[in-house]
């Protein structure tokens, strides 16, 4: 195979990977409530695709290269702040950051190989560093890394798709949380007439309410931060509501709207 053929195959693979990353960012952005953050991410995602296509096609103009690398840095920063603001699921943020970092490194190698007219082994760049990654700290807090798990990044273009295993796991966990709270609420309703108050400082709670500690016991392998995120998301969706002034005196219950819908 000629050097030109190798270059064409390599450049097409880079464009395909760029399309996958662009699509993933846009899919994740769809669920962001802050308009400015969502619009910036979407705009940068399209620019990322454009610059990546130009560079992978052989455009070595310094201005284009600088725009590409600046674009990747900006996307990385926005994904991280989106994660910190609870706008992007922790696992999605981790995957996107790693995808961007790996693509950035691979593109630099691609540029160097093209200058030297060398063929590039894509398997060494993508198969190990992108297609199958073991979760570990990537600049986020340790709380976000609940356990070492293999993430299949060939499905990165399906992020936030209900059929994707990643979001499927999150959905299953949140559904389990809702069902647990529902069970507590049912128990409280049955025992309402003879409820025994539990003391929490200066406040009392009725018997049978579901608190954060009950959810933590349900998912011992999941971090408290992630579960708080799940509870916050469920509250925002109007499925559950938080009652109390905070701390141990707070508990969660199914909203009347959700109860009527499923009753």
Image: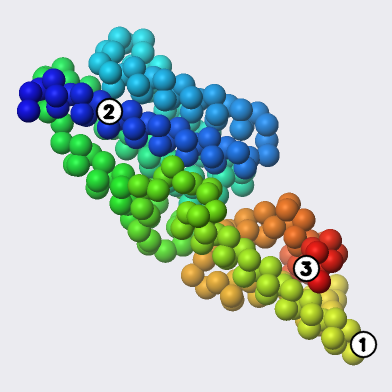
Disc 2: CA contacts within 10 A as few (<14), some (14-19) or many (>=20): some
State the image coordinates of residue 29 (x, y, percent, origin top left). Answer: 57, 37
Measured Cα–Cα span from mark 3 to mark 2: 49 Å
Look at the image and name its color scheme: rainbow
- The reply, left or right, for residue 144 in relation to residue 217 is left
Looking at the rendering, which quadrant does residue 250 occupy? Answer: bottom right
Reading the image, the residue beneath label 1 is 193
User: Which one is in front in this view, the residue at disc 1 or the one at disc 3?
Assistant: 3
Element marked by disc 1: helix
Inspect this view and state whether residue 258 appears. Answer: yes
The residue that mark 3 highlights is 262
The circle drawn on residue 12 is: 2
Q: Secondary structure at mark 3?
A: helix
Q: CA distance from mark 1 to mark 3?
A: 24 Å
The image quarter in which residue 257 lies: bottom right
Quadrant, the N terminus: top left
Residue 131, placed above or below residue 198: above
Where residue 209 sits in the image (x, y, percent)? Answer: 77, 76
Rounded to the nearest whole Å, what is the CA distance between mark 1 and mark 2? 69 Å
* Residue occupying the point 20% across, 37% down: 122
Q: Is residue 137 above or below residue 67?
A: below
Q: Position of residue 85 (x, y in %)?
A: 62, 43
Q: Nearer the viewer, residue 188 or 203?
A: 188
Q: Is residue 103 above or below residue 226?
A: above
Q: Where in the figure is residue 181, as x and y percent of width and height?
A: 72, 72
Q: Mark 1: give few (<14), some (14-19) or many (20+) Cα within 10 Å.
A: few
């Amino acid at each position: 195979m000629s050097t030109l053929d190798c270059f064409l195959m390599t450049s097409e693979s880079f464009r395909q990977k760029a399309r996958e990353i662009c699509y993933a960012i846009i899919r994740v952005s769809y669920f962001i409530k802050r308009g400015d953050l969502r619009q910036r991410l979407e705009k940068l995602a399209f620019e990322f695709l454009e610059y990546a296509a130009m560079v992978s096609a052989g455009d070595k103009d310094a201005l284009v290269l600088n725009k590409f690398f600046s674009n990747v840095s900006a996307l990385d920063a926005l994904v991280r702040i989106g994660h910190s603001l609870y706008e992007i699921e922790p696992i999605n943020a981790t995957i996107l950051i790693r995808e961007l970092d790996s693509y950035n490194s691979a593109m630099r190698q691609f540029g160097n190989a093209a200058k030297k007219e060398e063929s590039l082994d894509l398997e060494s760049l993508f198969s190990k560093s992108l297609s199958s990654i073991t979760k570990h700290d990537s600049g986020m807090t340790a709380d976000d890394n609940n356990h070492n798990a293999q993430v299949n990044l060939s499905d990165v273009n399906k992020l936030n798709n209900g059929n994707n295993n990643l979001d499927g796991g999150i959905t299953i966990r949140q559904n389990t949380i809702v069902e647990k709270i529902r069970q507590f609420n049912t128990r409280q309703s049955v025992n309402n007439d003879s409820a025994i108050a539990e003391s929490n400082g200066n406040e009392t709670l009725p018997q049978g309410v579901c608190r954060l500690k009950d959810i933590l016991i349900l998912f011992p392998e999941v971090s408290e931060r992630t579960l708080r995120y799940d509870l916050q998301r469920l509250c925002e969706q109007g499925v559950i509501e938080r009652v109390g002034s905070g701390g141990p005196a707070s508990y969660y219950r199914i909203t009347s709207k959700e109860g009527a819908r499923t009753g």
